[in-house]
Amino acid sequence: MTKKRLVLWDIDHTLVDFAGLGASWYAAAFTAATGAPLRVHPVFGGRTELATTTELLVENGFEPVQDTIRALFKALVAESERAAHRFAAEARVLPGAAEALTAFAGRDDVVQSLVTGNLPEISRHKLAAFDLLEHLDLEIGGYGTLSVHRPDLVPHAVGLAAAKHGTPFDADAVVVIGDTPNDVKAALAHGALSIAVATGLYSADELRAAGAHVVLPDLADTDAVKTAVFS
């Protein structure tokens, strides 16, 4: 029986580019959740939503208590829903993303899900805007609500996938694809294969320096992506 591979995709700057829309959502959501204006703006770069929100509350003078964090998460989801009609005009799917997802979906030996700093609901909104949901199992993903530490998301997703598919998904069968050093670190922390794409804020050299096993300029060459995943 062919051993299954678990391919865990990042979203922002890997599959899609939302061109800074998240920063505007945070400004509105912060005010909705706290009643105060956002003075210090968030830094993303492969971090989890829980990490970003916790730091943001502290730097803007609020205690990061669970009720406030949950209120901010709820407000962020509402902002993404309100902005959905703008996605086609202000965001874009990155070259080769749809083709890569489709190519792996046609294989019995690949399971595809997410490891992303996004909230689960916003993950769905962003992918649905470009018809990228069909080939991803979002139920077994690792999301930004889980931990302030990005590496914690990988074993969570692996555990859910193993339970659903009845296979252990050993480290050498797990592939993490992303565009930041944090994506790379999350893969390496669990012995997974790290594939990095230089479609975000980090250069190919920076991604190699972080320890990525394979660095691609983008996902446009589907054969190169497939070769990397099965290398």
Image (cartoon, grey):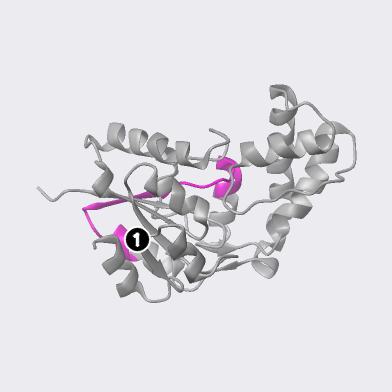
Examine the image and state in which quarter residue 227 appears: bottom left
Is residue 206 shown in magenta? no
Residue 17 in the image: above or below residue 49: below
Name the residue furthest right.
36
What percent of the width, then of the height, locates residue 206? Answer: 51, 65
Give the side of residue 202 with respect to residue 134, left or right. right
Instruction: Give the residue pinned by disc 1.
Output: 213
Residue 79 makes an appearance in the image: yes
* Magenta residues, start to end: 103-123
Return the x and y of residue 147 as percentages of the image width and height: 55, 33
Identity of the residue drawn at 90% across and 37% down:
36
Query: Residue placed farthest to the left in the image?
Result: 1
* Extreme residue toward the bottom, this view: 221
Crowd rating for badge 1 (residues with CA inside 10 Å; few <14, some 14–19, many 20+) = some
- Answer above or below: position of 183 versus 147: below
> In terms of secondary structure, where does tag 1 sit?
loop
Depth check, front residue: 168 or 204: 204
Residue appearing at x 55%, y 48% in the figure: 124
Amino acid, disc 1: His
Does residue 130 appear in the picture of this structure? no
- Location of the C terminus (image quadrant): bottom left
Q: Is residue 31 left or right of residue 71?
A: right
Residue 66: name its quadrant: top right
Residue at (34, 33) in percent of width and height: 159
Q: Is residue 110 left or right of residue 39?
A: left
Q: Position of residue 156 (x, y in %)?
A: 41, 34
